[in-house]
Image: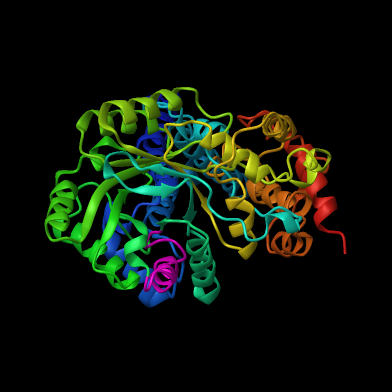
């Protein structure tokens, strides 16, 4: 076989490995699966947590196997170059050729993986880039002002949660970012103001959320509709998990929550019909329901296969509730899915990811007409009568007043105006989470999404000190963008002018 043919064969093999193996792992990473979903997951977690001392909230297994993929590619390249000494006796030139081969193989692997994960090639979806451009959201935020008129706001609207029959508040507590006593006090204050639904999960604040919620509902448990997830503190259970493990994680949630039952258990962040319809999960839920430990079954999704998953859930008739990413400017087809769920199965519908950024400070001119972007966004969601409630993350005391101020309110012309202005302002600047389409384009290995996120903290959140602190921790700073040929330009699926934004971020975040 000739040299050119060998090179072509190696290139094809590395690209296929990157696409099918590394790309599959990269696609799964944002879903947040528990270690059981990955080969030797238990042993890997034990090694990193018990021996190395890893303390992260998420399973390390996927990242470990991605690293193994890269090492395997490097090993293949070095094996292929084993005869280089005879072919090229000059050590310096040999080293440069080998280094170039390693760099090229890394780029090829990463590019092939990105095609699968971020752009959905071969998956039947548009990948995570489409999710981020259309439905994913930044963390929920706090309005920079706190008008006196908001204080002591209470729930003003209640709706029926589909066939569960429960009347729940139209704005409900998401507890993904709460912990410790402050978290308990925020949840209890929301309950005192009329909230009747709390959403939690074992992997929120590494089980801290469930512990806070458990303390908050003491004495009022029968007045609260309580939802949790089939997951552990390290991630969601994958398809094929044993019936015993599905049951066990819910029973562990009950212990943390201090209750003997939950009203709803979700298959969370579901991207696969196989996981949605896993026979073991359904058998476990049926047993939990028969034992009085869980009352209703639901699923949530904000992933590339959201439409397929929701369609199967509706057709199956097995699910009482669905929780979908839903906000202004979202996929038009989601409205149809919500209507089908309500009319065909009388499913309850919870809207999540109800906010999608934090440019409150850029909207100052609209505050007389629409004091808070969050309230306009919540009213937009609730203007759909098929939506049972909007869930939003409460993690500051102000949120109780700010978010409940939108309860029961009709969508106003001023709200539509502020949402339209918001969308105009984020065009070309909003760096969507879980995207990473630009990663791999920078020869200096700059973490472009981190730089843009820290800039957002500085100029949109007005959290200058935290933004600068986080920026200083980056191994590579955006000063490398000065004089660069900008291979990243054009890589952003939503059109961000990356080099201009990163250079500006460096100037902004290095002010002292």
Question: Is residue 38 at least partly visible in the picture?
Answer: no
Q: Residue 337, position in %: x, y?
A: 38, 26
Q: What's the residue at 77%, 48% (across, down)?
A: 480
Nearest to the observer: residue 298 or residue 252: 298
Q: What's the residue at 67%, 30% (across, down)?
A: 416
Left or right: residue 397 versus residue 53 is right
Q: Quadrant of the C terminus?
A: bottom right
Position of 227 relative to 341 (above/below): below
Q: What's the residue at 72%, 44% (across, down)?
A: 359
Q: Residue 148, position in %: x, y?
A: 74, 59
Q: Quadrant of the N terminus?
A: top left
Nearest to the observer: residue 197 or residue 509: 197
Q: Residue 3, position in %: x, y?
A: 44, 27
Left or right: residue 57 versus residue 367 is left
Nearest to the observer: residue 196 or residue 332: 196
* Residue 189 falls within the magenta-colored stretch: no
Count of numbered tags? 0
Nearest to the observer: residue 328 or residue 78: 328
Left or right: residue 408 versus residue 1 is right
Hey, which residue is sitting farthest front in the picture? 156
* Residue 209 falls within the magenta-colored stretch: yes
Q: Residue 429, position in %: x, y?
A: 71, 37
Report which quarter residue 204 is drawn in. bottom left
Question: Is residue 392 at least partly visible in the picture?
Answer: yes
Q: What's the residue at 16%, 55% (across, down)?
A: 289
Q: What sort of colour scheme is used for the picture?
A: rainbow
The span shown in magenta is 200-219
């Amino acid at each position: 076989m000739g040299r050119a043919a060998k090179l072509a064969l190696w290139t094809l093999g590395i690209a296929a490995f990157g696409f099918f193996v590394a790309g599959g792992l990269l696609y799964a990473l944002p879903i947040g699966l528990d270690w059981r979903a990955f080969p030797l997951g238990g042993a890997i977690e034990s090694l990193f947590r018990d021996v190395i001392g890893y303390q992260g909230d998420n399973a390390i297994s996927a990242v470990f196997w991605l690293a193994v993929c890269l090492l395997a590619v490097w090993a293949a390249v070095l094996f292929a170059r084993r005869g280089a000494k005879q072919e090229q006796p000059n050590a310096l030139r040999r080293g440069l050729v080998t280094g170039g081969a390693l760099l090229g193989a890394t780029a090829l692997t990463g590019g092939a993986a990105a095609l699968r994960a971020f752009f959905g090639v071969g998956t039947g979806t548009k990948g995570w880039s489409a999710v981020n451009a259309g439905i994913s959201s930044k963390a929920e935020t706090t309005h920079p002002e706190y008008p006196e008129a908001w204080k002591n706001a209470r729930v003003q609207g209640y709706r029926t949660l589909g066939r569960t029959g429960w009347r729940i508040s139209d704005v409900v507590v998401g507890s993904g970012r709460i912990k410790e006593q402050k978290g308990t006090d925020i949840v209890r204050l929301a309950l005192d103001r009329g909230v009747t639904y709390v959403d939690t999960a074992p992997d929120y604040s590494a089980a801290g959320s469930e512990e806070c919620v458990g303390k908050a509902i003491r004495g009022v448990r029968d007045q609260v509709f309580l939802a949790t997830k089939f997951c552990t503190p390290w991630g969601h259970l994958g398809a094929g998990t044993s019936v015993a493990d599905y049951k066990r994680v819910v029973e562990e949630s009950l212990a943390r929550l201090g209750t003997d039952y939950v009203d709803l258990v979700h298959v969370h962040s579901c991207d696969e019909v196989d996981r949605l319809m896993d026979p073991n999960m359904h058998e476990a839920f049926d047993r939990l329901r028969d034992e009085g430990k869980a009352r209703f079954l639901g699923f949530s999704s904000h992933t590339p296969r959201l439409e397929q998953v929701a369609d199967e859930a509706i057709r199956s008739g097995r699910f009482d509730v669905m929780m979908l990413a839903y906000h202004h400017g979202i996929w038009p087809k989601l409205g149809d899915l919500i209507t089908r769920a309500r009319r065909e199965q009388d499913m309850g519908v919870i809207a999540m990811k109800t906010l999608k950024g934090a440019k409150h400070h850029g909207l100052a001119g609209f505050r007389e007409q629409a004091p808070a972007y969050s309230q306009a966004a919540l009213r937009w969601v609730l203007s759909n009568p098929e939506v049972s409630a909007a869930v939003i993350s409460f993690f500051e005391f102000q949120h109780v007043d700010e978010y409940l101020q939108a309860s029961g309110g009709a969508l106003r012309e001023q709200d539509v105006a502020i949402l339209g202005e918001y969308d105009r302002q984020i065009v070309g600047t909003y760096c969507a989470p879980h995207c990473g389409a630009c990663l791999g384009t920078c020869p200096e290995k700059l973490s472009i999404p981190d730089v843009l996120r820290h800039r957002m903290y500085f100029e949109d959140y007005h959290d200058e000190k935290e933004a600068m602190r986080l920026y200083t921790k980056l191994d590579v700073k955006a000063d490398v963008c000065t004089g660069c040929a900008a291979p990243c330009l054009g890589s952003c699926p939503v059109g961000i002018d990356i080099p201009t934004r990163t250079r500006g971020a460096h100037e902004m975040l290095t002010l002292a």
